[in-house]
Amino acid sequence: MGQHTIKMPDIGEGIAEVELVAWHVKPGDVVKEDQVLADVMTDKANVEIPSPVNGTVVALGGEVGQTLAVGSELIRIEVAGAVEKKAVERAVAAQVMAPAVAETPRPARPSPQPPAQRSDGDVLDRPIASPSVRRRAWELGVELEHVKGTGPGGRIMHGDLEVHAAKHGAAQRAPSLPRGEVRGEGPPSTEDRKIPVIGIRRKIAQKMQESKRRIPHFTYVEEIDVTEVEALRAQLNMKWAAQRGKLTLLPFIARAVVLAVRDFPQINARFDDDAGVVTRHGAVHLGIATQTDAGLMVPVLRHAETRDLWSSAGEIARLADAARAGHVTRDELTGSTITITSLGALGGIVSTPVINHPEVAIVGVNRIVERPVFQRGAVVPRLLMNLSSSFDHRVVDGVDAAKFVQALRTLLEAPATLFVT
C-alpha cells in the first residue's frame, strides 16, 4: 500500500489558480478510476477533476470556497501498489473535462456503484456529463448510468436527459428545506443561517464590486413611445413567425444600438484604465444579460451589425437557452463591447444598471406600460417604456450619453428608420 497525491492540474489558458466549489468525496471513501473527485471554477466555468487511480481517500487538500494554485495538493489517495507518477499526471490531464457553465454545487454523490446496464444490455462506464446536467439529473431522480449520451465521447447532454426522462419517467425530487425549517403549520424558523458566497455567486459579486469600484457610473433615463415598434413587431410575427421564428422587442433594440453607435463610437468601446487606453470597436458585439439559476451571465451576440431581426432573435434565444441550460461556452461569454440588460415584465419603472467592466455603457430596458398621452390635442392610449442606461463618466460625457439615448428613442419611435442604412 502507498499514498498518491493528486495535484491541481494545469487546466490551460494561462490559469494559475482555481476556486474549489464542490467535493464529491470525503476521507474514507473508496474511489474508482475516472470517478469525479471535485469541481473547481475558472472564471465562469466549472471543471470536473476525476481520479486517475483506484483507492481510498486519505485527505482533502482544501475546503469548498478556497482558492487553490495550480500544482498544489488537491487530494491524497491510498492505493494498492506503486503508481507511476508521470502516467497519473497524463491521466489527470487527459480526463479533466471541458469547462461547463458554473452553477450551485450539486448534492454529494452517493458511494460509487457497479457499472449499470441499459435495457439493451450494454454496460455503461461512469457517465460523462457537465455539473449542470448532473444536478438536473439529481433533481429529476434519474440515474445517469442509464442515460445514453449523444455528445462527443458519449457525453450526456441536457437534451439526452430530457429525452430519457420523457421516455422512462422521472422521480422529481422535492427541494430540500433549509436546516431548522419543517413542513406543515407552525411559526417560521428564527435560526440564522450562514451561506458561503462561492462559485458563480462569488464571481458575480467580485465583478460587480470591481465595476462599481473602478467606474464612475452615471445613469440617464428616457421615456420612449414603443407603440409603433410594437405594432410592427406584432405584424411581422403574424406573417413570419411560423417560418422565421417569433420576434421579441430585443432584436429591435439591438438594431437601434447598432445604428446609434455609428454616430457615437465612444459608446461602443472598452476602457483599459490600467493602460489608459480606450478602444473604440468597429464591430458591435452585444452582451445580452441573462438571468439563470446559476446567476447572471452575459452571453455575447457577435457582429450584431451584420444581422437582420430574425438572425438576432434566433441567436439571442439560442444563447439564453444555452446559458440557462448550463452549456454556454467560454467564448460565448467573452468579448462584448456594449451590453443590453432587461428584466422583462419585472423591469420596473427605472433602474440603475451596473456597467459590464471594462465596457463603458449598458442599455437597461424597463417594462412596457400603457398610459394616456396627449397627441394632437387628443388623449390617446400609448405604449411607453423607459430606457435606463448607465455610462462610464471618464469616457462618455453626459451630453453624448443623452444624445445617444435620444438617438435610440428616435429610431424606436419611427421603426421604419431601423431599416434605412
Image: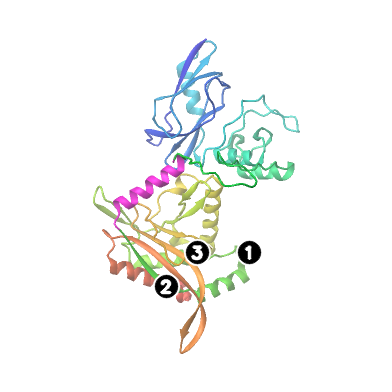
Looking at numbered disc 2 in the image, what kind of residue is underneath it? Answer: Glu
Q: Which residues are magenta?
A: 197-216
Coloring basis for residues: rainbow
* Disc with the residue nearer the chain's start (3 vs 1): 1
Q: Of circles 3 and 1, which is in front? A: 3
Residue annotated with mark 3:
251
Which type of secondary structure does the marked residue at label 2 adopt? strand
* Disc with the residue nearer the chain's start (1 vs 2): 2
Which type of secondary structure does the marked residue at label 1 adopt? helix
Q: Position of residue 382 (x, y in %)?
A: 51, 78
Residue annotated with mark 1:
243
Please report the residue visible at 55 percent of the width from the left and 56 percent of the height from the top. 317
The answer for how far apart the CA atoms under marks 1 and 2 are is 33 Å
* Disc with the residue nearer the chain's start (3 vs 2): 2
Q: Position of residue 309 (x, y in %)?
A: 51, 65
Please report the residue visible at 56 percent of the width from the left and 39 percent of the height from the top. 180
Q: Which mark is residue 176?
A: none
Circle 1 packing at 10 Å, graded few (<14), some (14-19), many (20+), is few
Q: Give the residue at the far front of this rendering.
A: 186
Task: Report which quarter residue 172 is drawn in.
Answer: top right
Image quarter in which the C terminus is found = bottom left
Which type of secondary structure does the marked residue at label 3 adopt? helix
Residue annotated with mark 2:
223
Circle 2 packing at 10 Å, graded few (<14), some (14-19), many (20+), is some
The answer for how far apart the CA atoms under marks 3 and 2 are is 19 Å
Q: Of circles 1 and 2, which is in front? A: 2
Looking at numbered disc 1 in the image, what kind of residue is underneath it? Answer: Gln
Q: Is residue 206 magenta?
A: yes
